[in-house]
Image (cartoon, coloured by chain):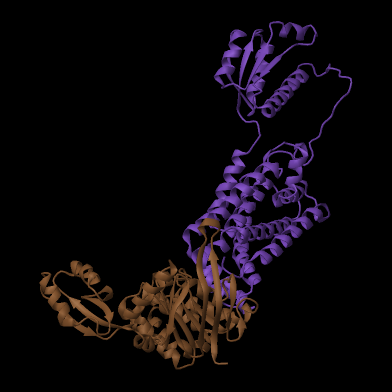
Chain colours: A brown, B purple
Amino acid sequence: MDNSVIVSDIGKCFGHGNHKVRALDGVSLQVKRGELFGLIGPDGAGKTTLFRIVASLMLPDCGHAEVEGFDTVAQYREIRKIIGYMPGRFSLYQDLSVEENLKFFATLFGSDIKKSYPGIQPIYRYLEPFKKRKAGKLSGGMKQKLALCCALIHDPKVLLLDEPTTGVDPVSRKEFWEMLGLLQDKGITVIASTPYMNEAMRCHRVCLLQNGKVVGCDSPENIRRAFPFKVLSVKSAEMFRLLEELRRYPGCHACYPFGAYHHFYCKQGSVQADTLQQFLENQGYTDIKIKESEPTIEDCFMDLMSQGGKDGN
Amino acid sequence: MKQFFAFVEKEFYHIFRDKATMLIILLMPVVQVLIFGFAITTDIQNTEIAVLDQCNTPESRTLVAKMDAGSYFQVSGYLDSPEQIDEVFKKGKIKMAVVIPPGFSRDLTEGETAQVQLVTDATNPNEASIITGYLQNIIGAFAMELKPENPPLPMVNVETRMLYNPQLKSAYTFVPGVIGLVLMLICTLMTSVSIVREREHGTMEALLVAPSKPIYIIFAKTVPYFCISIFNLLVIILLSIFAFDVPIRGSFLMFFLASITYIFTSLCLGIFISTVSKTQQIAMIISLMGLMLPTVLLSGLMFPIESMPALLQGLSYLLPARWFIDMGRVIMIKGLGFSYIWMQWTILMGMAAVFLALSVRGFKVRLT
């Protein structure tokens, strides 16, 4: 068996009566052992609920999940010994110092800092200068590193990271993902969720979750390759009016703002860059710049999500 | 076991690093014992009375002087006519008016039974009967002094002896009760928020996902409060001995044993509240409203349980404080030994076991 985590047809609802919210709706996925698996989706997509169910912290309404062959409901005790889980909300003790937090969690797992040191060293070395500082007084990035240390302290087989980089500055975010790369070498299965699409590229495979449903699951490369449209990056002096104009343009599949450019999706061969340029010039736009670009993972997700949204409604 | 000590260590850090908590748990007992101890008292002290002396002879003046002499009463007004009695009561300063009729001295010297009228404000019936009793004693003593060779001859001679508390100090009954109340507040209130706080702060999520045994988590929460409560207990005992002059007549060790049993029961009750409450606020409301009020009213701290309706008496059996106050009075005031408190002690231990079992069972191993 080379699947580390198997989720099959999981459903979960919250609330009662009219206020019932379907957080997860028939979610199935398999994560291979040693894989860095990304769970991507907007806020409220059901990522945290899925993590909690896999971490045995929550019971699913239907379907079942297993981690390393253990059922998350019946064998939750076994699961809690082999997983490392980093909740989305900082959940260490703010009034304990870095060292005390680590020591406490190490002891909980029947280990101690010395024994676990080699495992966490690559991450802990960033924290070591602040080991006497209270966890509540750490910066956002440091907090996340400490939480990761605590989740890794017992050498888990599966690591579940719920939005580990939310609220963290871009440099720390990059560092954090580099650390996850280091864990790959040790064969740890890592499932991480993130609302940042650009982080998805670092995963072996990504799964896009929306409104509690899986709308796409593959390697980032395959997802990009499967993108059925040509992407034109369009820019002009008046960006706001341009967006509406492009969306009305015949042959336009969709158009989204992407930083300095608007990304214009169209069927291969249906729209030519110079005809579009001509058209926009006639409409009175200035400083027009159009270039054909490779679809990025974000393009794919924007498109997948718009389809998912249509299905959902 | 190592796990357990790690939990205990963590709990100690939480308490010692939170200055507000420290202040509350160390200062609250002292302040409460002092407030309750001095406020809840039925002792008669400096009660103001008015006198309408229609006789105005050396005898009547001696009687009034005797009333004024002790620390119980203070004659604060002399009235001129019976009409004024109503007026002074309406003003509310006076608890009692003493009327000495014109024939008072004559009756005394002629060997007749002299009359004195006591008019009391019975808005508070307990107080009214107590001060009437005190004043009757003073008048009785006055009569005896006047004619010691010829005492009045009642048909039955009643001789009363007040056992255990001959001076009828109310502190003797209240101090054990106040100890019970204060310990209950500290132990139950503090622990009742402890588990639900971890749920609210999200730290429970990290705790649950580790292979930690619920019994460890629960027991570890009680340990630091247990230590602090013992410290508080010693402070309270010192206060009751030196501030309220309440002795521990029985064995100190016995009282200590009774108290730590009660502390343990209160802690278990607090933990139980914490496992069933959804938020810290609910836990606080349950332990303050749901426990403090019944403890004050029903545990025998203020009102005798025997005179309550059967339903309330039944309720009082459920209050740990009732059994502790019972034990406290038996040991401190009566000075009796374990054979007189074994039942109360066993009941408290049983309660602790039940609360603990319910907490472990009710402890949610998942998030809800």
Q: Is residue B9 above or below residue B275?
A: below
Q: Position of residue B147 (x, y in %)?
A: 79, 16
Q: Position of residue B94 (x, y in %)?
A: 59, 21
- The residue positioned 58% from the left and 86% from the top of the image is A68
Residue in the foreground of this view, choosing between A90 and B258: A90
Asked whether residue A308 appears in the rendered view, the answer is: yes
User: Which corner quadrant of the image does residue B67 belong to?
Assistant: top right
Quarter that holds the N terminus of chain A: bottom right
* Label total for image: 0
Q: Position of residue B108 (x, y in %)?
A: 76, 10
- The residue positioned 41% from the left and 79% from the top of the image is A145
Residue in the foreground of this view, choosing between A120 and A63: A63
Q: Is residue A265 above or below residue B152?
A: below
Q: Is residue B116 above or below residue A107?
A: above
Quarter that holds the C terminus of chain A: bottom left
Asked whether residue A172 appears in the rendered view, the answer is: no
Residue in the foreground of this view, choosing between B187 and A5: A5
Q: Position of residue B368 (x, y in %)?
A: 57, 65
